[in-house]
Image: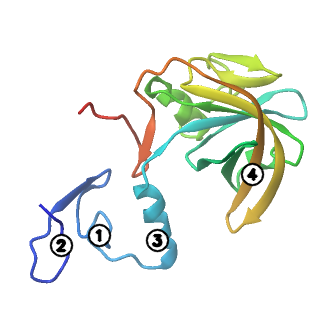
Amino acid sequence: MPRSDGPNSEQLPNRSGGGIVFGGGTRADGAAPESMADVIAGLRRRWPSGVAIVTARDADGGYRGVTVTSLMVVSQEPPILAIALTEAGSFQRLAIDGADLGVSILESTHEFSAERFAGRAPVPERRFTGIDHRLEDGIPILEDPLAWCVGRVASRQELGDHVLVLLEVTRGNLELDTDDPLLSYEGRYRRLEAG
């Protein structure tokens, strides 16, 4: 049945993390967005995406990581990824030109790791305590990812409240494909439904 949001049409519900949402331009509570920033925030939440953890070593040799959903392949040859990092976050300060970074594409069993590196789960004295990982070219990669890569930051650009990082991939691999990626939609982690 096609969806129509016209004044004389029956509105079909959309399922989202905020409950049932009617109409395309309303929030979960039914109110219209208050600003363009609200619209963009909603657009970002409603764009389903995979989840990855980007990792690095800090100046003291410790391991650091951050959960990201804004990741895209810019070029296959040469291999380049684009990663958007929050400008206010501390991790973006490690992603300077020439820095080595790792990317782990998460499977659904990594939800706790995603929560921890997003700053929403208890963090012990070190972020990697209790997180199974290995080193690839000196950069931490989570164990059992769907895929991983390491590379060097080619450039970075401050764009509003985010920093866009271009990563030249130097090495990587596809791991066991479980057909069960960790996904993000409406600010919650999700799984693919069989169908």
Label located before the other in sequence (1 or 2): 2
Contact (Cβ within 8 Å) of mark 1 with mark 2: no
Q: Quadrant of the C terminus?
A: top left
Decide which of tag 2 and tag 3 comes sooner along the chain. 2
Q: Which residue is mark 2?
A: 4
N-terminal-most mark, 2 or 4: 2
Q: Earlier in the sequence, mark 3 or mark 4?
A: 3
Q: Position of residue 141 (x, y in %)?
A: 68, 24
Image point (17%, 60%), residue name: 13
Q: Which residue is mark 4?
A: 165
Q: How far is the residue under mark 1 from the one under mark 4?
A: 32 Å
Q: Give the left or right position of residue 57, taking residue 129 as reference.
A: right
Instruction: Quote the CA–CA distance across marks 2 and 3.
Output: 23 Å
Q: Residues within 10 Å of mark 1 (few under 14, many from 20)?
A: few
3D distance between C-alphas at marks 1 and 2:
10 Å
For numbered disc 1, what is the local secondary structure?
loop
Q: Are marks 1 and 4 in contact (CB under 8 Å)?
A: no
Graded by Cα atoms within 10 Å as few (under 14), some (14 to 19) or many (20 or more), the crowding at tag 2 reads: few
Cα distance, mark 2 to mark 4? 39 Å
The residue labelled by disc 3 is 38
Residue occupying image coordinates x 62% and y 16%:
132
Q: Which residue is mark 1?
A: 24
- Whether label 2 touches label 3, CB < 8 Å: no
* Residue that appears at 70% across and 26% down: 172
Give the farthest residue toward the front.
77
